[in-house]
Image (tube, grey):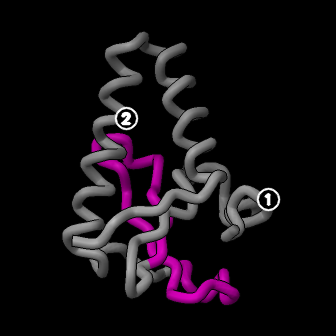
Amino acid sequence: MKSVHWREGARRDLDDAAEWYAQQGGETLELRFVAAVESTVLMVRQHPVVGSTRHAGYVTDLPAPLRYFPIRPFESYLIYYIDLPEHIEVIRVWHAARGLDALLGDEESQPK
């Protein structure tokens, strides 16, 4: 099973979403969301090609096709990632309502 590397933008996304869920429904909801993210990432680690490449043509400067998979049961959130030979790189934890225009638009989303 491949290791997972998180880009800064993805870490920030996760923190922001978890904080929002904590404000909306308390610590229990926050922990459910974080557990759902962890479960989704584990599934992606076990089956890297499971994610859709539907948006891969939208971002062409990545070293591998961009994939995404919904975070269940929080399907409005998607894990965007790339499957590299050595590891899985989580690009963003993205709310679908934000659209694709800003997906890779900040420095924290770029590789270091």
Calculate the distance from the C-alpha at mark 1 to the C-alpha at mark 2: 23 Å
Which of 12/76 is in front? 12
Query: In screen coordinates, is 91 left or right of 89?
Result: right
Q: Label 1: state its secondary structure.
A: loop
Which of 5/20 is in front? 5
Which residue is painted at 64% across and 52% down in the image? 8
Amino acid carrying label 2: it is: Val
**Place of residue 95 in the rendered image (x, y in percent of width and height, measured from the top left):** 56, 48
Query: In screen coordinates, is 97 left or right of 101?
Result: left
Which quarter of the picture shows residue 112? bottom right
**Disc 1 crowd, CA 10 A, few/some/many (<14, 14-19, 20+):** few
Amino acid carrying label 1: it is: Asp
**Disc 2 crowd, CA 10 A, few/some/many (<14, 14-19, 20+):** some
Which residue is painted at 22% across and 74% down in the image? 47
**Place of residue 62 in the rendered image (x, y in percent of width and height, measured from the top left):** 62, 84
Residue 15 colored magenta?
no
Name the disc covering residue 106, or none.
1
Q: Residue furthest top?
A: 26
Q: For the magenta stretch, what is the residue range?
A: 55-82
**Place of residue 98 in the rendered image (x, y in percent of width and height, measured from the top left):** 66, 51
Q: Looking at the image, is 20 positioned above or below residue 65?
A: above
Which quarter of the picture shows residue 29? top left
Q: Disc 2 marks which residue? A: 34
**Place of residue 53 in the rendered image (x, y in percent of width and height, measured from the top left):** 45, 82
Query: In screen coordinates, is 60 left or right of 54?
Result: right
